[in-house]
Amino acid sequence: MNNETFRTELNDLGLKQTDIARLFEVTPRTVNKWAQGELRVPGCVSAYLKLYKSLSFSKRCLILKQLGKVK
C-alpha cells in the first residue's frame, strides 16, 4: 500500500492517524511518516485496513469504542 492509498483508506473509514497509532502501538509520528511516504506502510497495517473495511458497521464501532473514540 502506498502512502496515498493509506491516507485515502483512513479517510474513507473515518479513522485518524492517532487511531492507527493506538491500534499498532506506534507513535503518531510513525503513522505520519507512513502517510507522507517517508516510511513504507507495513504489510500488517495494509492487511488490517482491508479486514477492518470488510467488517460491519457495528463491529467497527466496537473497535472504535475500545480505542476510546466512541462512548
Image (cartoon, rainbow, N blue to C red):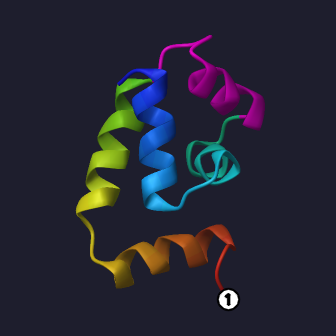
Q: Look at 41% across and 73% down and name the residue there.
A: 60
Percent from the top left, x then y, of residue 41? 47, 23
Q: Look at 62% across and 20% down and name the residue there.
A: 36
In the image, which residues are magenta? 27-41
* Outermost residue to the bottom: 71
Q: Is residue 5 left or right of residue 67?
A: left
Which quarter of the picture shows residue 29?
Answer: top right
The amino acid sitting under disc 1 is Lys
Q: Is residue 15 left or right of residue 8?
A: right
Q: Look at 30% across and 39% down and name the residue there.
A: 47
Q: Is residue 43 left or right of residue 7?
A: left
* Outermost residue to the top: 38
Q: Classify the position of the C terminus by image quarter.
A: bottom right
Q: Nearer the viewer, residue 4 or 49?
A: 4
Is 31 included in the stretch rendered in magenta?
yes
Q: Nearer the viewer, residue 26 or 3?
A: 3
Q: Look at 37% across and 47% down and name the residue there.
A: 49
Is 28 included in the stretch rendered in magenta?
yes
Q: Classify the position of the N terminus by image quarter.
A: top left
In the image, residue 18 above or below residue 57:
above
Q: Nearer the viewer, residue 58 or 13?
A: 13
Percent from the top left, x then y, of residue 59? 36, 78
Q: Is residue 3 left or right of residue 21?
A: left
Residue identified by numbered label 1: 71
Percent from the top left, x then y, of residue 24? 56, 43
- Could you classify mark 1 by the number of other residues whose Cα lies within 10 Å: few (under 14), some (14-19), or many (20 or more)? few
- The main secondary structure of the magenta stretch is helix
SS at circle 1: loop
Q: Count up the numbered dots.
A: 1
Which quarter of the picture shows residue 53?
Answer: bottom left
